[in-house]
Each structure stands twice: as C-alpha cells, then as structure tokens.
Amino acid sequence: MEERGAARIFPNFYAPVIIEEGKEKLIKLMRYHVCPKNGNELNTFKYNLFNARRDRLLDSKIWKPLFGKQHAIFPFHRFYESVAGENGETKLIYFEPKDRQIMWSAAIFEEAKIESGLLRSFAAITDEPPPEVSAAGHDRCPVFLSEDKFDIWLNPKLSTKEELVELLSSTVPTYFEHKAA
C-alpha cells in the first residue's frame, strides 16, 4: 500500500488532513480507515472504521478514546457514495456543494505501531444527511466545520466533550448537488 494522496479518496487510500502539534497546524498524509492503536485491524474491512458516527463518539470502543484527544480536519471538494440504482444495482455518485467551496470535514485520528513503523489513520465524522443527500439514497453525510471553529476542533483538550459534541451540531449549512461518478 502506497502512502500518497489520490484525486478520489476511498477507504484505505491516503489523504491530507490538518492536525495541530504544539502550536503549529500541520498537513499530514493519513490513511482513510482507522487502524486501532494495537494494529490488529490493519487490513480488515470487517468494520466501517473510515466514518465515525457523531452519535457514537462517546460510547464506541474505537471512537471514544480518540474523541476529545486526537482531532483532525479533512478537506475535500466532493464526496462519493454507493447507492442503489433503479434496478437494484449499485452505482457510484458524488456530492458537491452547490457553491463549489472546499468542505472541511471534522475527523479523528489514530497513530498505531505496526510492523513497518507508525501508521497514521483517520475517520471522517458523519451525521444524519440533509434532505437532498437522503433523497439521492444515502443515509449519512460528513460533518463540516466553519473556519472559525478550526482552532476549537484542533485543540480538543481545551473543551469538554459536551462542548465538542455541540460544536459538531452547529455545522456549516450546505446544499449538495449530486451526479453519477
């Protein structure tokens, strides 16, 4: 598996994410599919470890240790989803904001020690979709942050977990258009 970014990011691909180390914001390349700290889930896709449901951040054994500690921001222009077609076949569609702006998705990350070294991996935080995403056949949508919330999100230790959950509830209102990929 190569550690390089891709134009289309799918689970297990590498993508740039923004984190804060010390007082510096850094862009790091991380795998889009969390590998738990013990490294045991390195190449399994038995579980969806690329999207972290907002309503499970406080109780999931995978997300709870990361939420409030290891936050990132995942920037992108569009996101892809598989949906059922008219005849039951699976089709790939993409969603992008009508205004074509960059989306800044809240994310959490892990650093796992594996045989070949340190693996940095992340999951985008998702929530209930807006009506147009739901109507297109998908049941989740990334949670998008406004730029004035970046510092709060990237410094989670300065807030309570309840404040961070509330921050994820006050996201950027976005209208999405979708097309076949």
Image (tube, rainbow, N blue to C red):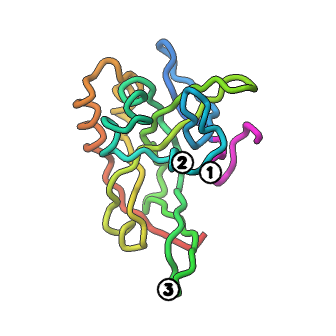
For label 1, the SS is loop
- CB under 8 Å between callouts 1 and 2? yes
Choose the circle earlier in sequence order: 1 or 3. Answer: 1
N-terminal label among 1 and 2:
1
Judging by the rendered image, the residue that carries numbered circle 3 is 86
Q: Residue at x 56, y 24 (%)?
A: 26
Locate residue 34 relative to residue 149 in the image: left or right: right
Q: Amino acid under label 2?
A: Phe
Quadrant placement of the N terminus: top right
Q: Is residue 114 left or right of residue 32?
A: right
* Circle 2 crowding by C-alpha within 10 Å: few under 14, some 14–19, many from 20: some
Q: Amino acid at mark 1?
A: Ile
What is the spatial separation of the Cα atoms under label 1 and label 2, in whole angstroms? 9 Å
Up-down relation of residue 141 to residue 33 (above or below): below
Q: Which mark is residue 9?
A: 1
Q: Which residue position is annotated with label 2? A: 76
